[in-house]
């Protein structure tokens, strides 16, 4: 991995900063929730203690069976249908006490509501029997014997009973069973599984008792009748209280409830006695969908989802309310599934003289908390992300600059690693950091290597020059000694001395050849020749010199014209062929080939039977380097391939060596530039 990528990866550690901020915001969210929860509990307890005496007494009276009054947003149309009644599923339900074939599943659902100063009653009768009341009542003159609904109303002044029965559905006027009394306006409608009733109640009604009478199949009256409701037969057995018959309690709650909150007063069974009304600002929000999404990520995902709640609930049965109705403070956090809104609901018990009467319930939306958390999160996230970006960009730029300096230094060192003997000049040596110190020390090392390279380059010429005179003296002395009369042992010593001198002379001749070639390259005359023809002449000469060897030549179909120094190329080819001959067996062929490609000509010499030693390929072409194994014939100083490299470089090219793919030979290739 590159240096700047390593530092960039290291900069990812700075992501711990926004993560820490994220955790901090979550802790802030929990702290704010706890504070809001405590404040809301304190407000609920204050309202419970401040509940007026009259409302406490009314709450105490509602400890029994009550018929809750729901708030009717619009005045219901008296048609027998319940479509204009809110939450019709929240109702009192009564079933027949005795289940028989004729009245199996008889059920009565009772709903009550208030709109302004008027009270309304809705009754839904299910499974009243195979014979409907409208059919059964035909021809029955006595009202008390008819099938239908018995209703008893009790006011401050009197108690009245009503038998609601009809021979046909539709609007009807119901008269009291007594000779004098009020009349009730009602509407009757048959349904698929029974019938429904809507009635307008008197404004002074306090409680009521209601029941449904279902006829039996094949019977008119008597033991075949079935009942469901609060009646015992056709007489009241249990009364249903109508709590909060005026809006005073709800108006008091609306005045004292905290801002942006909603309050309910519920009796011991969870039925709502008073409601402060929906919070008008609950649906307003200054948050965008992005902020809400971020808040949902911060908020506790395990928080309970909020159920769809009616605008005017009739009964509260949440965990917080149930807990408060057992005498303990209850609290519940819930969140909306679609938006980021979080709701806090608390409930405290209302106790009078040691008796649990009900509960005071308060609920508020966390919109203010949400806004505060989002502001904190937004600022912290912006600062954290800005720091991460700045630090990451800074580290990346620093790493890029450092990487470029290292690359420049590496390129300069690579360029200086040649055998020209030139003193290198490295970059970044003027800086005072560790990289500058490394560059200065590397420059000193390369300068020493360059001086040593120049020394090695001149060593062969100096040795050949200095050894010529001692060799000449030694040879003349041996010649003079050979003219003397010597015994056989002395003659043997003389022969060995001559062989040693000859070897030394060959070494000096080889070193002189390399030095002379370096000078000849500069003075050589260049001409344009047919390279294929030149190779043909050379191969013909090699075949005549080595008739026992098979030397092949492969030329391209087209002529290859090249401006070059023919003598130098022939000398370089001589060295390569000599290597191939001396380092391979007699039965191994030698292949010489010429290839052309864009901007260059390639001369290759291939022989089988040997492989390159395990050294760097470029070291094979250094001066005074010999990698021949002992089985190679003759003495070698390692100047042959060095001469080949000098010739290739003089022609603007290069030479390389590699083993064959099958591992059974080696190929040397001279690449000559066409320009």
Image (cartoon, rainbow, N blue to C red):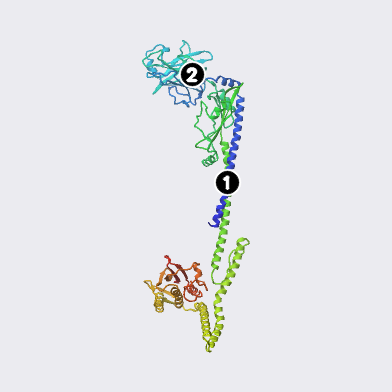
In this view, the residue in front, 609 or 540, is 609
At which x and y percent is residue 329? 59, 29
The residue lying at 54 percent from left, 68 percent from top is 417
Task: Pick out the residue farthest to the front.
Answer: 488
Residue 92 lies, with reference to residue 449, above or below; the image says above
Residue bearing the label numbered 1:
18
**Disc 2: CA contacts within 10 A as few (<14), some (14-19) or many (>=20):** many
Residue 87 lies, with reference to residue 426, above or below; the image says above
Cα distance between the residues tagged 2 and 1 = 64 Å
At which x and y percent is residue 422? 56, 71
In this view, the residue in front, 96 or 88, is 96
Query: Disc 2 on helix, strand or loop?
Result: strand
Residue 345 placement: quadrant: top right
**Disc 1: CA contacts within 10 A as few (<14), some (14-19) or many (>=20):** many
Asked whether residue 379 appears in the rendered view, the answer is no
In this view, the residue in front, 654 or 160, is 654
Residue 644 lies, with reference to residue 31, above or below; the image says below
Disc number lying in front (2 or 1): 1
Query: Disc 1 on helix, strand or loop?
Result: helix
The residue lying at 45 percent from left, 78 percent from top is 567
At which x and y percent is residue 638? 50, 74
At which x and y percent is residue 94? 46, 20
Task: Pick out the residue farthest to the right.
Answer: 432
Contact? badges 2 and 1 (CB < 8 Å): no
In this view, the residue in front, 388 or 304, is 304
Residue 511 lies, with reference to residue 271, above or below; the image says below
Using residue 529 as the reference point, say whether residue 492 is left or right of it: right
Counting residues from the N terminus, which is met first, the one under dot 2 or under dot 1? 1
Labels in figure, total:
2
Residue bearing the label numbered 2:
201
């Amino acid at each position: 991995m590159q240096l700047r990528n390593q530092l960039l990866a290291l900069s990812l550690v700075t992501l711990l900063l926004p993560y820490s901020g994220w955790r901090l915001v979550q802790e802030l969210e929990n702290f704010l929730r706890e504070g809001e929860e405590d404040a809301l509990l304190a407000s609920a307890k204050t309202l419970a203690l401040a509940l007026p005496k009259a409302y406490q007494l009314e709450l105490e009276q509602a400890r029994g069976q009550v018929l809750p009054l729901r708030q009717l947003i619009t005045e219901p149309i008296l048609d027998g249908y319940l479509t204009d009644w809110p939450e019709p599923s929240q109702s009192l339900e009564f079933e027949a006490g005795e289940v028989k074939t004729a009245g199996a599943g008889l059920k009565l659902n009772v709903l009550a509501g208030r709109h302004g100063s008027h009270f309304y009653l809705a009754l839904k009768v299910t499974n009243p029997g195979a014979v409907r009341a409208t059919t059964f009542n035909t021809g029955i003159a006595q009202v008390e014997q008819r099938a239908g609904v018995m209703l008893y109303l009790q006011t401050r002044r009197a108690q009245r009973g009503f038998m609601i029965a009809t021979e046909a559905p539709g609007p009807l006027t119901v008269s009291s069973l007594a000779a004098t009394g009020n009349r009730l306006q009602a509407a009757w409608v048959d349904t698929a599984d029974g019938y429904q009733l809507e009635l307008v109640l008197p404004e002074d009604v306090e409680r009521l008792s209601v029941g449904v009478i279902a006829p039996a199949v094949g019977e008119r009256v008597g033991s075949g009748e079935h009942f469901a409701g609060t009646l015992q037969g056709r007489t009241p057995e249990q009364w249903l209280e109508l709590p909060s018959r005026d809006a005073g309690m709800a108006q008091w709650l609306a005045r004292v409830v905290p801002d942006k909150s909603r309050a309910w007063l519920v009796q011991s069974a969870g039925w709502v006695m008073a409601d402060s009304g929906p919070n008008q600002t609950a649906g307003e929000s200054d948050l965008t969908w992005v902020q809400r999404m971020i808040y949902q990520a911060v908020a506790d995902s395990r928080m309970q989802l909020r159920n769809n709640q009616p605008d005017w609930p009739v009964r509260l049965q949440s965990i917080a309310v149930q807990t408060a109705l057992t005498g303990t403070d209850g609290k519940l956090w819930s969140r909306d599934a679609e938006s980021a809104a979080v709701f806090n609901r608390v409930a405290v018990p209302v106790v009078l003289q040691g008796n649990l009467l009900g509960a005071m319930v308060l609920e508020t939306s966390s919109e203010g908390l949400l806004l505060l958390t989002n502001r904190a999160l937004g600022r912290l996230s912006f600062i954290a992300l800005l720091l991460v970006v700045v630090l990451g960009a800074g580290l990346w730029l620093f790493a890029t600059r450092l990487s470029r300096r290292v690359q420049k230094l590496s390129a300069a060192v690579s360029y200086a690693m040649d055998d020209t003997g030139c003193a290198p000049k490295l970059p970044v040596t003027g800086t005072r950091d560790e990289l500058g110190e490394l560059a200065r020390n590397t420059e000193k090392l390369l300068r020493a290597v360059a001086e040593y390279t120049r020394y090695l380059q001149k060593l062969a010429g100096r040795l050949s020059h200095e050894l010529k005179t001692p060799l000449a003296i030694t040879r003349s002395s041996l010649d003079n000694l050979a003219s003397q009369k010597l015994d056989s042992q002395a003659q043997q010593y003389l022969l060995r001395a001559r062989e040693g001198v000859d070897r030394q002379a060959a070494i000096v001749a080889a070193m002189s050849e390399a030095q002379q070639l370096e000078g000849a390259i500069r003075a050589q005359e260049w001409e344009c020749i047919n390279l294929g023809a030149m190779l043909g002449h050379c191969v013909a000469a090699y075949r005549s010199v080595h008739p026992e060897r098979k030397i092949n030549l492969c030329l391209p179909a087209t002529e290859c014209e090249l401006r070059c120094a023919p003598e130098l190329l022939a000398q370089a080819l001589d060295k390569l062929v000599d290597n191939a001959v001396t380092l391979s067996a007699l039965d191994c062929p030698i292949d010489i080939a010429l290839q052309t490609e864009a901007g260059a000509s390639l001369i290759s010499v291939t022989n089988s039977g040997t492989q390159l030693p395990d050294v760097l390929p470029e070291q094979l072409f250094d001066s005074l380097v010999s990698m021949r194994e002992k089985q190679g014939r003759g003495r070698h100083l390692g100047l042959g391939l060095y001469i080949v490299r000098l010739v290739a470089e003089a022609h603007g090219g290069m030479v390389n060596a590699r083993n064959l793919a099958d591992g059974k030979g080696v190929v040397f290739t001279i690449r000559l530039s066409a320009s």
